[in-house]
Image (spheres, helix red, strand yellow):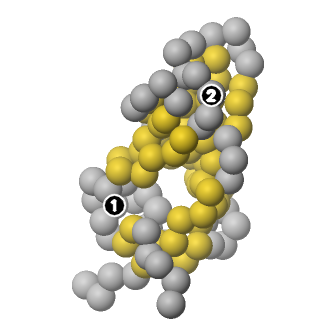
């Protein structure tokens, strides 16, 4: 059985990604999230540490059960852009 990382109806769960780059001069951050059907969603995010960003799950985000692919997106003050490594997240279904 695969390990569930978050559930479809969770609210307030923090999803954090390590970018591997210094975010001091970041002017925009987001998490690109590909749902199990292949549709891409842009999740709002904020910088939590020198190299980490986070999204706080809402009822309308990461709400489709199945395997999601997540990727950090960062835009810097010099207009350069950075995309992090792709991570997978398993969203489980609730019984309620």
> Tag 1 or tag 2, which sits nearer the N-term?
2
- Residue 29 against residue 13 in the figure, above or below: above
Left or right of residue 41: residue 56: left
Q: Residue at x 40, y 59 (%)?
A: 60
- Residue 58 against residue 16 in the figure, above or below: below
Residue ID for mark 2: 21
Quarter of the image for residue 27 reads: top right
Left or right of residue 44: residue 37: right
Check the picture and name the quadrant holding the C terminus.
bottom left
Q: Residue at x 30, y 88 (%)?
A: 95
> Which disc is residue 59 wearing?
1
Q: Position of residue 25 (x, y in %)?
A: 57, 13
The crowding category of the residue bearing disc 1, from other C-alpha atoms within 10 Å (few below 14, some 14 to 19, many at least 20), is few
Q: Position of residue 40 (x, y in %)?
A: 65, 56
Q: Residue at x 32, y 56 (%)?
A: 13
Q: Residue at x 54, y 77 (%)?
A: 66
């Amino acid at each position: 059985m695969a390990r569930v990382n978050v559930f479809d109806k969770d609210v307030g769960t923090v999803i954090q990604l390590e970018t591997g780059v210094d975010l001091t001069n970041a002017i925009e951050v987001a998490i690109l999230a590909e749902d199990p059907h292949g549709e891409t969603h842009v999740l709002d995010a904020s910088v939590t540490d020198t190299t980490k960003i986070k999204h706080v799950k809402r009822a309308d985000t990461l709400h489709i059960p199945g395997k999601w692919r997540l990727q950090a997106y960062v835009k810097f003050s010099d207009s350069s852009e950075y995309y992090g490594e792709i991570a997978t997240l398993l969203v489980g279904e609730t019984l309620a």
